[in-house]
Image (tube, helix red, strand yellow):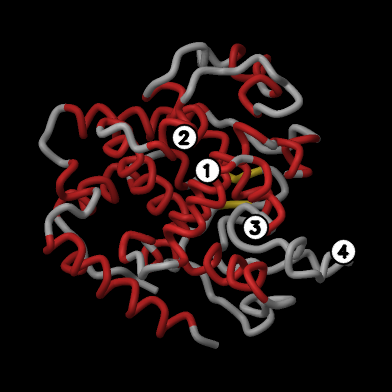
Amino acid sequence: MTQSKSAFPHYFERIIQIATRSPIMKYRWLDRGVAPSGYIKGMALALGRAHCRLKINDKYIMEMAKGETSNKNKDVLTYYKTTFQSLGMDNSQSGPDTLRHLFTLLLGLGMRESSGRWCEGRDMAAHNTASDTAEAGLFQTSWNAHEGNPLLLELYNSYASTVRPSSLFAIFNEGVRAKAADLENFGSGEGVNFQKLTKYCPEFAIIFAGIGLRNIRDHWGPINRQEAEIRPEANELFLAIQKNIDASDACDDLIGESQAASDATARGCRRAAEAARP
């Protein structure tokens, strides 16, 4: 699906332009190939929005951006410390640098788990068909992960209780064709609702996985095997976005505090949801 430039606020388009020019758009991920264009653009926008939310001390983003905890059994930043250090990425301090580095890893994890496809369903070769263990979405997360930190359940409830036009769904849908099997969910209750939410609200999936990686990193097999790539091109893209935001007055546009931003994003989400139906 091609996203019309008129569908989103001005600064959304600015970040999309920065992402489009980034070398990471054409990078061939190991065993996965080139990412869908909407995945890179969507992750760039999600990073920009998270950067703005960090400025207003959003508790979910602060948890993602906290300094490395030195607990390699729980914290992905400690578990991947050697790799981060080899790339000159210091995560010892809380703040925007650590947030950016986590997003850089999230980008690689999403490619490993779903090839950047928001609609990815559970691994059909596995037997995890219960509602609390069936994986879904960009990062192949399952409902039982919410037990890893109280913030995860709070985050889920905040998204599940209302329509979130900031899901960026329309952008993540670019370059992705969902099949009926992709959209199948398993079980009932909160678990099946989680599967739907993590597919149709990519921004929720990102924040949920980000908090999870800081507290229960062993939930993800590719993390345990250190298969998720950390690409310097991605870090450079996200740094350019952070610098651009800091040099402008963009956060009102990005985090939807203006009604125009909220309305425009909501329209894009509705169009993408209709286009994504098999």
* Residue placed under numbered mark 2 in the picture: 234
Depicted 91 relative to depicted 51: above or below: above
* Residue placed under numbered mark 3 in the picture: 114
Element under label 1?
A: helix
Q: Residues within 10 Å of mark 2 (few under 14, many from 20)?
A: many
- Give the residue displayed 62% in from the left and 37% down from the top: 213
Please state if 44 lies on the left or on the right of 91 as rendered: left
Looking at the rendered structure, the kind of residue marked 1 is: Leu
Q: Residues within 10 Å of mark 1 (few under 14, many from 20)?
A: some
Please state if 272 lies on the left or on the right of 183 as rendered: left
Q: Position of residue 16 (x, y in %)?
A: 29, 50
Q: Residues within 10 Å of mark 4 (few under 14, many from 20)?
A: few
Lower position in the chain sequence, tag 3 or tag 1: 3
Lower position in the chain sequence, tag 3 or tag 2: 3
Q: Which dot, 4 or 1, sits closer to the camera?
A: 1
Q: Marks 2 and 4, how far apart in space?
A: 31 Å
Q: Residues within 10 Å of mark 3 (few under 14, many from 20)?
A: many
Lower position in the chain sequence, tag 2 or tag 4: 4
Q: Which dot, 3 or 4, sits closer to the camera?
A: 4
Q: Marks 1 and 2, how far apart in space?
A: 27 Å
Q: Marks 4 and 1, how far apart in space?
A: 28 Å
Q: Marks 3 and 2, how far apart in space?
A: 18 Å
Q: Which dot, 3 or 1, sits closer to the camera?
A: 1
Give the image quarter of residue 189: bottom right
Q: Position of residue 219 (x, y in %)?
A: 74, 44
Q: Quadrant of the C terminus?
A: bottom right
* Residue placed under numbered mark 4 in the picture: 126
Please state if 250 lies on the left or on the right of 87 as rendered: left
- Give the residue displayed 69% in from the left and 43% down from the top: 30
